Amino acid sequence: MVLRNFPVSMKSIPQNKLNPFPPYEIKPGKIRGLFPAPPSKSISHRLLILGALTQKPSRIHNVLFSEDVLITLEALRKMGFQWEKQDNSIVFSGIRKPPAGVITIDLGNSGTSTRLLTAIAAALPGEYLFRGSPRMQERPMSPLINALRALGVCLEHRDGYLPLKLKGTRIRGGKVEIDTSQSSQFLSALMMLAPLTREGMEISSTGAIVSESYVQLTKELLKTAGIRIQQKKGLVIIAGDQKYQLTDAKVEGDYSSASYFAVGSAISGGSVCIENLYQNSVQGDRAVLDFLKAAGARIFWRDDQVCIEAGNLKGIDVNMNSQPDLVPTLAVMSLFVQGQSRLRAIEHLRFKETDRLNAIIGNIQKLRGKILLDGNDLIIKPVPLVGSTLPTFDDHRIAMSFALAGLRIPGIKIENPGCVNKSFPEFWNYFESLKQMT
């Protein structure tokens, strides 16, 4: 069964209330062929915001039109930024016309949209009310709220969660601390805000920076937009009153989306070549190639394609602090290797679109797999498995990761398959076109 055209509308964005679809039944097979990696969700969010803030016409090419990115685009429109879609590009006019009255923006369950746009709105004239899905109202915002308050921003909130109301104004800037133990998005948000302040900002992070690779991604994209940045251990310094200069940019292919087919080919005994990826990308999920190589897969670059060939896979022991989105995929991979795997530093998965840690453990247990939470590590030991109908918890990465289990285990069904719209609307089409029945 191939599901085509899950509805994702530019005008009516579903807020985690997707049309009901029956569970997606997966037949075992091997992943083989050529796969064009879709545009990066993380880079699409950031480049669109930077393009909107550029006070002249700008064009962002190769945008990912997924549910989350459409939420960011619609929010930018409501904030007064003028843009139009031209093929797979978004063109900003360079003009902002904010509407009168309170600007109400529904951010669904897009954590990236919520954190980044809240900070940006704080420096733009207007009154804003940010709302979100029930799950987004459970995801933490306190670190960003505290930092904005320290900068003099006037805002109201619900005990550190959405809904949140603020009044945008010209911010002076200065020294500010941000707790990055739950999400790196708080730090990325302040980094994107800093150039809009009068005097700039010195941002110090407290606690370990989870998903630190996304901070480096934000840094590189800010530099692409002409922003001067200094970074030292635990400190980011950005001068104020800088102009964003991003008149033309292209979104690169997404390693997170590519990871499903890279791992799928390795565990199914297949082979896949993936194009549209940058070999020297700063995306943290590029590490999937290193993890697969450590497990025993063969990885090589040919022209502008990376190829993955299956091998005799063995267990891995890796730190996942900077690659949280890969954890569900590697957990599934670990079911089909020789020997035990340990995925370290995974505690911040509890704050994702769902409690992703419980989702992984629960679904592996439904397959009668052996998985143990040891402090902040997941330990997975391969044992004989059985098919089952698996819940997705409305989480796109749970759906796509556990679909891979169906390549090896008969009887796998994925509930609510439409949740992949959040980051990869064409996932099921590619999954079926690349799968060769065994």
Image (cartoon, grey):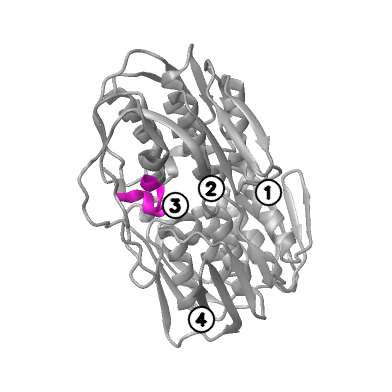
Under mark 1, the amino acid is Gln
Q: Nearer the viewer, mark 1 or mark 2?
A: 2
Give the CA distance from mark 3 to mark 2.
12 Å
Q: Residues within 10 Å of mark 3 (few under 14, many from 20)?
A: many
Q: Which residues are magenta?
A: 418-429
In the rendered image of this protein, does residue 372 appear above or below residue 389?
above
Q: CA distance from mark 2 to mark 4?
A: 32 Å
Left or right, residue 232 beside residue 337: right
Who comes first in sequence, dot 3 or dot 4?
A: 4
Quarter assignment of residue 67: bottom left
Q: Which mark is residue 80?
A: 4
* Label drawn at residue 45: none
Q: Is residue 136 magenta?
A: no
In-front residue for pair 307/287: 307
Label at residue 423: 3
Q: Position of residue 240 (x, y in %)?
A: 75, 69
Q: Residue at x 54, y 57 (%)?
A: 144
Upstream in the sequence, badge 2 or badge 4?
2
Q: Amino acid at mark 3?
A: Ser
- Judged left or right of residue 171, residue 362 is left
Q: Is residue 377 visible?
A: no
Please provide percent x and percent y for residue 333. Answer: 45, 25
Q: Which residue is mark 2?
A: 37
When the figure is inspected, residue 400 is found, relative to residue 152, above or below; the finding is above
